[in-house]
């Protein structure tokens, strides 16, 4: 295969989601020209703000080779806890703090079980998906904490804005910036990639694998709690099912955004594109007045397609490394002579054959 | 040494059992087999030697249909193998491979194992067929026995018997078959090999145990860096000349002995000592105890304990080891050393970000660039730039990155190297040796664990030989590499258990 075609293929594999996003926007605009408007763009962003807040730390966790399927239930349980504290004390601040503390604790518990006890992350967090989902239902008796029980401050939180910028959007930006910094400019980011690429190699480098993984789980729990509270504020009432399907959507977005399920690979830009793709898709389906059941089916199919793409993308990228490496080596050999045989006379393979009296067949 | 095809009287060009024609296999940038041409007659027993990465397993994998050759082809009894040979087709051509660990399911019976994956329809005759196949390898085991009740030697027989089920066995490829066997089991395996050869089966025998090869093989082939470099009759070799044939024997005259700086630092652990400024070898069997010794010092499996300048040091984890200043370059660089996808720069600096300016709180894209450039010059690293993924570099240059990581960003007190030059080309071996000797001269204590005597000979001032818990010290002499091999043979003959007792 020619080098240029290999480069093109791996470029497309790595950046396909950006092109897919543009195509999707064009597609919906053709079907309905009103789709392309500033108002609708802001709508899309606001619709995925909470999802984005969960996906970014989850992507970090996935890059480290782990996963958290309990994010949706942690969001529900945290939101419920925070609502109950608010209605009991009348203090929004206390309520939010209670919710966030619960989220960190739930994430840390996942982290402890996975990182320190070595349990399988899929099984552990699947278990807590059920535990925290059940907990949220139990403490509320399955009933929604209504707006009448919640402080007024909290009701304003959902629509609050700094200048023209909605607070919910600013919180998303804050999380994006934080995750970008950790992944690209902090030591822990490099360690996260290393752990996901080869946990054993990372350990042999002296990386404290357990501590990093524990921290990532705790951060994901915190972000889930924040998302759950925000989802409640958005509709000004807190249902125990507020985080329903969040894990499903978050996993879909992360995989769409090029995070490898096997770990070691993923970028913030890709995840953001995946998030927008997901938001545009849902928004577009609403625009086309598709049935909500059809939407659920499409999200599920997207997840399956994303996993399939993940596999082939990683393969294409690995192939391109090998091909490119070979090309570079060959050109440097042409320029400098063969590095393998440029030693002293008599130590080249041909020399050895002669010395040992072996003819080449 | 005579050319093989002429050394066999009566074996005409036409009736060769196996014929390889200019066979090459490439993986990415590395060439695992490089234009190998050879032919083997029916009933011949051939020993195949070579260091790790020399291409022995690749050759076996091509013959058994696991890998496809990049170019060239091979024929069995004059019938060319199809380009995309599958393992099933290879078995159908009469090619059987026996690995060190028999590929059997322990929770099934012999009978189930024999017919597993053969695609044969279950029938009443199966038990009889199995009994006949077992009889072919001289065993009267009951096919109903569970595999996990069998000894390792018996399991190998079952594995062998499988080769007789698919049809006639024409060629038997043995990959380190005696590595885990006791003496009696080894001898009965050799007897069986002779019987099979007498019946016309061609045997290719890979082993690190030179005496085993000399015991049973008529002809010896040596692979080095994917090329066939030696092909001769077994009588023309002794243990010592074989060791020499394996060793490139270079750089000996240029070797500068170390200035031992015992006062600057002296590590002692379990009968081994190494002083600052010194490069000391630990020689033993393939995957032998010398490697677990290094892992132990590094705190990889529980605490690492040793004394440094007569003071006790306790290393709790690899992290603690790195903080103390003991660095390990592991033997399996792809799985234990490198992280696929990491940039070349990150590969070198991953453990060190917290010690660079910014203490790991701001790791810019060019942090460490200067040290990296220096390391690249010192180790003569070739390939793409510092931001390219490490996977784009060739094997030898990847190994040089791994060495750079532990040698240059921070100078260690003790450097542990596990087979630092395995699977790299001759030039890279020389570069690595030079850099390691230079680092030692700056007052670093270096331990080199290896199963290749010439690697020790190229790098070390003296060496220990390790086998079965015993240690023997071997000083550097004119025949260093050969001395190491004969010391190991001596130790292993004294220690080798009589029966397949677990070691």
Image: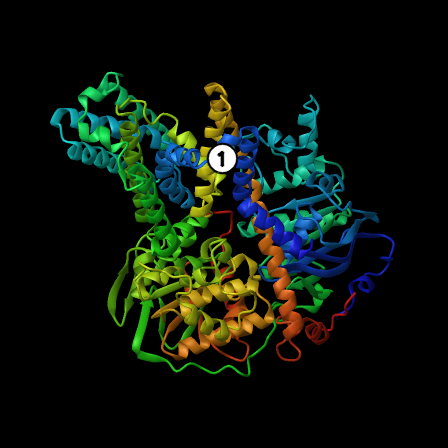
Question: Which percent across, then down, holds residue A333?
Answer: 64, 70
Can you identify the residue that label 1 sits on? A36
Question: Which percent across, then down, holds residue B299?
Answer: 33, 57
Q: Quadrant location of residue B353?
A: bottom left
Which residue is depicted at the point 21% across and 26% down? A83
> Quick check: A79 above or below B333?
above
Towards the viewer: B406 or A303: A303
Q: Which residue lies furthest to the left in this view?
A: A89
Tell me if A4 is positioned left or right of B146 in this view: right
Towards the viewer: B28 or B159: B28
Question: Which percent across, then down, holds residue B358?
Answer: 30, 63
Q: Does the rendering let one see residue B212?
A: no
Identify the secondary structure beneath mark 1: loop
Which residue is depicted at the point 15% across and 34% down? A94
Question: Which percent across, then down, holds residue A132?
Answer: 29, 26
Q: Quadrant location of residue A74?
A: top left
Q: Circle 1 marks a residue in which chain?
A: A
In the picture, the quarter occupied by the C terminus of chain A is bottom right
Towards the viewer: B498 or A90: A90
């Amino acid at each position: 295969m020619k080098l240029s075609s290999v480069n093109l293929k791996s470029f497309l594999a790595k950046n396909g989601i950006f092109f897919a996003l543009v195509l999707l926007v064009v597609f919906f605009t053709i079907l309905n020209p009103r789709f392309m408007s500033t108002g609708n763009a802001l709508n899309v962003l606001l619709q995925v703000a909470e999802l984005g807040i969960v996906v970014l730390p989850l992507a970090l966790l996935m890059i480290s080779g782990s996963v958290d399927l309990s994010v949706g239930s942690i969001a529900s349980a945290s939101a419920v806890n925070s609502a109950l504290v608010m209605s009991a004390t009348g203090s929004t601040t206390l309520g939010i703090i209670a919710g966030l503390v619960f989220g960190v604790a739930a994430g840390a518990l996942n982290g402890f079980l996975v990182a320190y006890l070595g349990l399988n992350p899929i099984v552990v967090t699947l278990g807590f998906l059920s535990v925290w989902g059940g907990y949220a239902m139990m403490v509320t008796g399955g009933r929604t904490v209504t707006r009448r029980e919640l402080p007024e401050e909290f009701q304003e939180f959902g629509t609050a804005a700094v200048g023209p910028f909605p607070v919910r959007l600013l919180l998303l930006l804050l999380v994006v910036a934080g995750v970008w910094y950790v992944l690209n400019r902090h030591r822990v980011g490099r360690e996260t990639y290393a752990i996901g690429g080869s946990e054993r190699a990372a350990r042999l480098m002296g990386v404290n694998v357990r501590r990093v993984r524990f921290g990532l789980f705790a951060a994901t729990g915190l972000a889930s709690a924040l998302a759950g509270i925000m989802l409640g504020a958005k509709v000004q009432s807190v249902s125990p099912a507020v985080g329903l399907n969040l894990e499903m959507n978050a996993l879909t977005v992360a995989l769409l955004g090029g995070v490898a399920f096997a770990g070691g690979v993923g970028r913030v830009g890709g995840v953001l594109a995946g998030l927008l793709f997901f938001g545009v898709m849902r928004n577009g389906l609403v625009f086309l007045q598709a049935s909500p059941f059809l939407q659920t089916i499409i999200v599920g199919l997207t997840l399956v397609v994303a996993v399939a793409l993940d596999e082939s993308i990683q393969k294409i990228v690995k192939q391109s490394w090998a091909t490119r490496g070979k090309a570079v080596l060959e050109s440097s050999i042409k320029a400098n002579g063969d590095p393998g045989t440029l030693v002293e006379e008599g130590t080249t393979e041909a020399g050895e054959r002669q010395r040992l009296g072996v003819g080449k067949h | 040494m005579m050319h093989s095809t002429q050394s066999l009287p009566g074996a005409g060009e036409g009736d060769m059992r196996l014929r390889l024609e200019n066979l090459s296999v490439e993986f990415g940038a590395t060439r695992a087999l490089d234009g190998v041409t050879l032919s083997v007659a029916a009933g011949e027993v051939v020993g195949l030697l070579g260091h790790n990465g020399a291409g022995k397993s690749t050759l076996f994998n091509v013959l058994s249909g696991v890998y496809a050759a990049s170019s060239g082809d091979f024929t069995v009894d004059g019938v060319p193998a199809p380009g995309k040979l599958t393992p099933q087709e290879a078995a159908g051509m009469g090619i059987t491979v026996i690995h060190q660990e028999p590929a059997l399911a322990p929770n099934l019976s012999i009978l189930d194992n024999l017919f597993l994956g053969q695609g044969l329809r279950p029938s009443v005759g199966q038990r009889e067929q199995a009994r006949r196949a077992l009889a072919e390898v001289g065993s009267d085991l009951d096919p109903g026995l569970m595999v996990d009740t069998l000894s390792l030697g018996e399991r190998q027989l079952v594995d062998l018997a499988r080769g007789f089920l698919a049809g006639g066995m024409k060629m038997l490829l043995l990959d380190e078959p005696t590595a885990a066997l006791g003496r009696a089991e080894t001898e009965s395996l050799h007897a069986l090999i002779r019987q099979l050869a007498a019946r016309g089966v061609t045997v290719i025998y890979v082993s690190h145990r030179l005496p085993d090869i000399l015991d049973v093989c008529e002809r010896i082939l040596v692979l080095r860096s994917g090329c066939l470099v030696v092909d001769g009759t077994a009588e023309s070799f002794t243990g010592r000349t074989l060791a020499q044939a394996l060793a490139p024997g270079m750089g000996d005259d240029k070797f500068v002995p170390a200035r031992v700086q015992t006062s600057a630092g002296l590590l002692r652990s379990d009968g081994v000592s190494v002083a600052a400024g010194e490069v000391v070898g630990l020689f033993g069997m393939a995957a032998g105890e010398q490697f677990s010794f290094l892992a132990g010092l590094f705190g990889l499996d529980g605490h690492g304990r040793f004394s440094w300048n007569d003071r006790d040091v306790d290393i709790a984890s690899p992290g603690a080891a790195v903080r103390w200043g003991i660095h390990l370059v592991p033997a399996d660089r792809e799985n234990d050393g490198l992280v696929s996808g990491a940039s070349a720069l990150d590969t070198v600096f991953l453990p060190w970000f917290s010690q660079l300016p910014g203490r790991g709180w701001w790791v810019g894209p060019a942090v460490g660039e200067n040290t990296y450039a220096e390391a690249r010059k010192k180790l003569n690293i070739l390939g793409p730039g510092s931001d390219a993924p490490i996977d784009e570099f060739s094997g030898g240059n990847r190994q040089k990155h791994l060495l750079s990581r532990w040698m240059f960003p921070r100078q260690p007190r003790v450097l542990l190297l596990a087979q630092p030059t395995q699977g790299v080309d001759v030039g890279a071996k020389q570069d690595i040796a030079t850099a390691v000797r230079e680092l030692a001269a700056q007052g670093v204590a270096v331990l080199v664990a290896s199963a290749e005597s010439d690697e020790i000979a190229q790098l070390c001032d003296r060496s220990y030989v390790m086998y079965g818990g015993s240690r023997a010290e071997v000083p550097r002499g004119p025949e260093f590499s050969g001395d190491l091999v004969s010391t190991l043979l001596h130790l292993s003959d004294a220690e080798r258990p009589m029966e397949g007792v677990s070691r």
